Image (tube, helix red, strand yellow):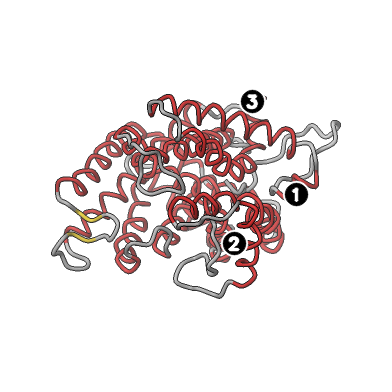
Amino acid sequence: MKERRYDMDWLRVGAMLAVFFFHCARFFGGGRWHLNNPEESLIAHTFIGLLDLWIMPLFFLLSGAGSWYALKSRTGGQYLLERVKRILIPLYGVGTFIILIPQVYFEGVSHNGYTGTFLEMWPRVAASVFTSTPNFDDPFFFNVFMGHLWFLQYLFLISLLVLPLLLFLRSERGQRFIAKLAGWCDRWGGIFLFLIPLAIIRIAFTHFFRGQEHSWAHFLNFAVFFVIGYIIPADERFTEGIKKVGWLCLVLGIIGFVGELAFIFILKYNYANFHHEGGEPFSLMYVLFNTTMSIASWSWVVFIFSLGAKYMNRPGRILAYANEAVLPFYILHQTVILCVGWFVIRCNIGILPKYLIIVVCSFIIIMALYEGLVRHFNWVRFLFGMRPKKLPSASAAPQPEGTAT
């Protein structure tokens, strides 16, 4: 098997673009956001609902795969130190004190009745970081606004908590377990074995965190995707098993998405609170809904991963540039989108022109910020979780290590 998995790099870049388009659509559908357009779009709602099934699970799966490569050349301590540099520094440095401040402002003006200026908002938010009290009701631990950077918080905590398991899986006993599991998954349909832990986690924990957007139930679900992603590069048979059922998973993913819509709109299942009107906790409706969601989510991830494995495992200059830009692009993207959308949604034009203007202008601004302020300066790269810029003579491409996205 090739040491470098270029397909995973391409999928990481593609997933980042999907998140970008997803957040550009949030003005027009998907419920309350930091800013909302006066009119909504059924197409936007559908687009958001479909991507919501697989986009973050795919991110965590790819991050787990990156950790497999990272631990090939690092001890557990070195791996955690890299996680601090790549995740915590951008999260609690440039993220908390610069990137997220405009999002807090937009949220306050749109939904919380804030009437002050943006400059008055900044010191208040900064002070709240240092005065927040511990809160273990969700995986954030502190009452600090995370915005879209919740992903980095989850990723660091998952990397920390599952590290003993990751190290075990690299041991002789762990390798024997992986080889046995790979033998099962190499059979046609064997890759659906991973559905068992995913469905169990959803069914066992979702009910206890009803109505929470980011809860321990979500955290555990993403942790399972992360561990699955870690296992996949360990044996080529996992990828071969994924290739065998790729198109079947497309069908199952579509059926699962239609099933989700049927639960919500026909059976009147309360998605936000995870119960059917008049139903009991852990009812048949609850179990069927969460099983359907697990099948849909895993099927979409497998289908997309299969496309990458079949058609995208090749290098390229565009890939080298884009793969390095993924993390800073992720950190910057939502705030830029909101700043552009703040002006665009007030215009008296249709939803499609608004969406296209937001997409084009936001992308240009993000890339300009990346090129002009981030990419060429090592101290800024450090703040954005990037490795130091190499000298021109150092032309060897790095191995795909555990990126934060």
Three-letter code for the amino acid on which mark 1 is drawn: Phe
Q: Horizontally, is 394 left or right of 356 in the view?
A: right
Of residues 347 and 99, which is closer to you in this image? Answer: 347
- Name which residue lies at 38% across and 29% down: 351
Quadrant housing residue 240: top left
Circles 1 and 2: CB atoms closer than 8 Å: no
Residue 71 appears in the picture as rendered: no
Kindly state the secondary structure of the residue where label 3 is placed: helix
Q: Secondary structure beneath disc 1?
A: helix
Q: Which mark is residue 382?
A: 1
Res. 116 in view: yes
Q: In the rendered structure, find residue 318 and report the number of the disc placed on it.
A: 3
Q: Earlier in the sequence, mark 1 or mark 2?
A: 2
Question: How far apart are the two marked residues, 1 and 2, measured between alpha carbons?
Answer: 27 Å
Mark 3 surroundings within 10 Å by alpha-carbon count, few (fewer than 14), some (14 through 19), many (20 or more): few
- Residue 308 vertical placement versus 271 (above, below): above
Q: How dense is the environment of label 2, judged by Cα within 10 Å: few (below 14), some, or many (20 and up)? A: some
> Residue 356, image x and y in percent?
47, 26
Q: Quadrant of the N terminus?
A: top right
Q: Residue at x 72, y 35 (%)?
A: 397
Which circle marks residue 167 in the picture?
A: 2
Three-letter amino acid code at disc 3? Ile
